[in-house]
Amino acid sequence: MLKAAVWLPLLALCVAPGIAAIAPAHAAASDTNSEYIVPAHVLDSHWSGARAMKDIETQLSFGRRAIGTEGHSKTLAFIRRELANTRAEKVQTQQWSVSDDNGAPLNLTNLIARFSPTRPNRIILGTHYDSIVRAYADAENRQAPMPGANNSASGVALLLETARALSALPPPPYGVDLVFFDGEEGPRSLGAGDPEWHALGSPYFATHLADFYPSQKPVQSIIFDMVGFKDLKLVPDSSSVTFAGPEVDRFWAIGRQVAPSIFGSTTTGPLIGDDQIALAQAGIPSFLVIDIDYEPWFNTTRDTIERCSATSLEAVGRTLLRYLYSR
């Protein structure tokens, strides 16, 4: 995830013709009138923060998870194993390669898990699973590994636990695609101080949408990043409000029902460069759920599991389930 200031020039893009006019998938909801296809308490009971924390712990055990590392491969294999135990009917991969600074190939893989794959109306839930090359922001050791408990592992944990919940519940009224993006931290990684940072996985996926959606684009996408911090506070970034304003309102309204201390703010935050950008540019209404107030641990050796909590993960995961099952 790239800090907001680097992305300020994208404000012009966000209001470009064809982007701001994207139609929302649903109408916005108020704070008090949400109704659910499955009762809220049943939805909540199927989303476990303890299991999600275990997923973070497992990923951290792999060590460095940047592109080309052994931990990166182990993380992909872990996601595959966990999805094999869910009701995902189709798990697909999208593979390609880029060159590193020395011209050597780096192999990348996006992984797509599809629930109710024959349903034409689909929602993408996305996150990235690669981590920063090094703890570049660490005052004491900028070359050390960056654990990535919150910035990397928390998003994967959120999607995996959501996959388990979807497997235990009746399907929502549309298909759900979980997309685990590779290379969000860039070809050299933000951790390498790359002034020309750009995500890799989501733009590649967006360029090849027809491979997975030959007749109809998804009705929307939601990207999750850095959602495990124990002092989580969530505000929508400005691009999300532009790309999918009514859906942002609906998600945050439901979030205030679940965890008002986390979703309490009604302000709009700065523009954040993340995977929602490429999907929105491809014509999919997209928004980002992220907590960027993660100092002094952001991209340091202190981004460890002690900074995360089951309570925060549950707040986001249960909000997501209620959102998916709301009328």
Image (spheres, grey):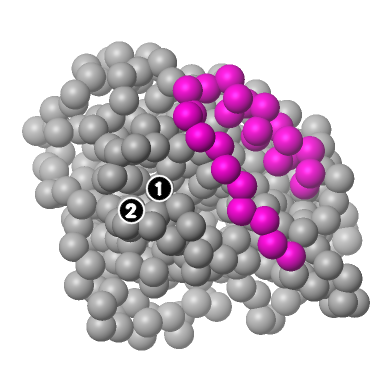
* Among numbered discs 2 and 1, the one appearing first in the sequence: 1
Local crowd size for mark 2, using a 10 Å CA cut-off: few (<14), some (14–19), many (≥20): many
The answer to whether residue 94 is magenta is: yes
Residue 196, given in percent of the width and then of the height, sits at 66, 81
Local crowd size for mark 1, using a 10 Å CA cut-off: few (<14), some (14–19), many (≥20): many
Q: Which residues are magenta?
A: 72-97
SS at mark 1? strand
Name the mark on residue 252: none
Residue located at (34% from left, 37% from top):
118
What is the quadrant of residue 304 in the picture?
top right
Kindly identify the amino acid type of the residue bearing the numbered disc 1. Ile
Say which residue label 2 marks: 218
The answer to whether residue 276 is magenta is: no
**Taking 87 as reference, is 28 above or below it?**
below
Residue 237, given in percent of the width and then of the height, sits at 38, 62
Q: Quadrant of the N terminus?
A: bottom right
Discs 2, 1 touching: Cβ within 8 Å: yes
**Residue 155 in view, yes or no:** no
* Cα–Cα span, label 2 and label 1: 7 Å
Say which residue label 1 marks: 124
Kindly identify the amino acid type of the residue bearing the numbered disc 2. Pro
Residue located at (24% from left, 73% from top):
20
Of 236 and 110, the residue lying toward us: 110
**Taking 294 as reference, is 47 above or below it?**
above
